[in-house]
Image (spheres, grey):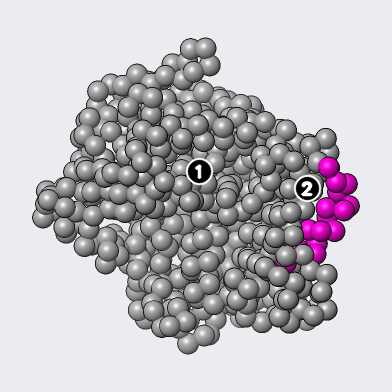
Amino acid sequence: MTVSDLHPWKEAPATVVFVGGGPRTVGLLERFAASADELLGGRRVEIHVVDPFPAGGGRIWRREQSRLLWMNSMTSDVTIFTDESVDCEGPIVPGPDLATWVAGEGAVILEKAGLEPPGPLAFPPRLVQAEYLAWVWERVVRELPATVVTHAERAVELTADQRVILEFGREIAADAVVLALGYLDRLPTASESAWAAQAADAGLTYIPPGYTADVDLDGLWPQAPVIVRGFGQAFVDLMVLLTEGRGGWYDECDGMLSYHPSGDEPILYVGSRRGVPYHSKLGYTVPGTRPVPTRYLTKEALGEGVLDFDRDVAPLIEKELAYAHYQQLFTAHPERTRWPWERFGETLDAWLPGTITNAVPGRDAESGAVTDAEFEAAVRAAVPDPADWFVRREVDRPLAGRFFEDREGFERFLTELIENDLLRRADPAYSADLAVFNALLSIYSVLSRAITDGQLSDEDRVRRVESEWHGFFSFVASGPPPRRLEELLALHRAGIVRFAGPDLEVAIDNDQFVATSSAVAGEIRARAFVEARLPRPDVLATADPLLRGLLDSGALAADELSAADGTSLGGGQLKADSRCRAIRSDGSIQETLFLLGPSVSGSAGSSGFSRPHFNGPGFRQNDAVARDLLKLLAPTVRKEERHAS
């Protein structure tokens, strides 16, 4: 009789390989450690984490990047740990959020790293988050009932018998594999390749979409004009690296920020579809305000079938945002309204966005419906100040319908627009903006579920949600810290940043890039052009050899998106079931291969770090996946006991 016969629970160590060592893997391993005592049954586990960048921060949150780059969240709005708000099956194991860590254990670590500790309402340097994630990683490793090995290289292949092949030749036989790859590099699009070829032929500098911290900016010459298309986070990072990053500096006198050039800065002509920068982050909080369940855009309202976004979803989003705005205005600032909230709320409830008359086909039972014109009239009657109105299309396109005969006039107008935005976003008298921000978060959650449930067509998902809706969400809710817009204005006053206008079109003419705007007369010529944005996610165009091999073999499946007329929309996301297990091209489930991250359908919490006391969806998903992993790895005898019970 063998030892295995006498002690059947003493199985060989289980091996789990995590490909990707960033925050998602850290959070998942924290949940793995939390439930291990309950589910693992004492089995030994070896965990391998494969990532060319250091575990904890991964590529995006690595220590080796400019200390000038900031997070887009306040210190107090970031955590890796569960708290009492999180609704999950595994045990809650509290840990410090970023603000608590900075004021406690992190203070000494930051001092050693030469970093100033940010306050709870500050937007900290990304290097502060890198240190926090490195500390969290070390804590999680200590708590894991497992041997943890890191591999500072890439995984290039996963074989059918589940051996992970690393780029330097090592093979790891795995019982389970988790792909948590974060944002993927992708091959250039046909358009980007054409731009690169034409620019090279003309001796021009073209920088395609990419993660700004990784982009080579040496081809952007001092004091030379550069056309920049994109006015979001990628532009802000570019602006910082090409100004302070090249030796310029700011000072402040009488509340006015001034920029002192080093002489090494290029002149940036920036434009985009909207032609305006993203709204700054709100500079205040209102106690007790937080995202609440949606009122109109509910699972019940959407039903079970496939939806038409414009007909079935967009009107509910319109009402949801209007309700959030006006409820906060009427209840928190009643002195600026003429009607009682109950009366206005009834009008809003009856409003059918998109209707011109009361003759609404298929809605005979709703003869009391309020049309767009009637709702607009109610707003004017009940809310006297236009600054208190919420009109989504005007929020989304503030320059729509305007034309400027000269660039100087346009730049004066845009400067005033940015200055007014900074004042408003710092003023709690406009707390309706905060209510809209919270509503956007709640809407995002509902849309994510509708996509996961297959209720939106490929065309609606790509064009309406991923492009239009996500663009609006980012513009309103994911803009830069206020200080960055103050710096933008200072750079404009210094002549370093010029405003190019909305609907920016770029072409090559006579060996120069030429930019024109539909709203601003004239053209801009330059020998450098930067696409300041992240590339559109498309796993079918990924440059990652591991994923390309798995897709080619059918071991993974991905959306191949097309419009109603058959036009290709490119690739979408990797397919996974509701438990994050990989789906093969034949539709079958791989029970030992898990997929997580922004390139995976239905992956929660991929848009950023969770806030404390917010019950972030990423926590719930991490917990569920961690418990599935533990059950998968548990000794056979324990599995049989659970099945019998």
Foreground of the two, 51 or 170:
51
- Residue 304 coordinates in the image, percent (x, y): 70, 80
Give the amino acid at mark 2: Ala
Magenta segment includes 340? yes
Q: Residue at position x 78%, y 47% from top?
A: 381
Foreground of the two, 552 or 10:
552
Quadrant of residue 236 in the image? top left
- Residue 531 coordinates in the image, percent (x, y): 33, 50
Q: Residue at position x 32%, y 27% from top?
A: 495
Decide if residue 494 is on the left or right side of residue 555: left
- Residue 476 coordinates in the image, percent (x, y): 57, 47
Q: Which residues are magenta?
A: 338-352
Give the amino acid at mark 1: Tyr
Which quadrant, please, contains the N terminus? bottom right
Q: Which residue is mark 2?
A: 381
Tags 1 and 2 in contact by the CB under 8 Å rule? no
Magenta segment includes 272? no
In the picture as drawn, the residue positioned furthest to the top comes out as: 254
- Residue 186 coordinates in the image, percent (x, y): 34, 62
Q: Which mark is residue 278?
A: 1
Foreground of the two, 575 or 567:
567
Decide if residue 569 is on the left or right side of residue 27: left
Quadrant of residue 285 in the image? top right
Q: Residue at position x 32%, y 29% from top?
A: 496
Q: Earlier in the sequence, mark 1 or mark 2?
A: 1
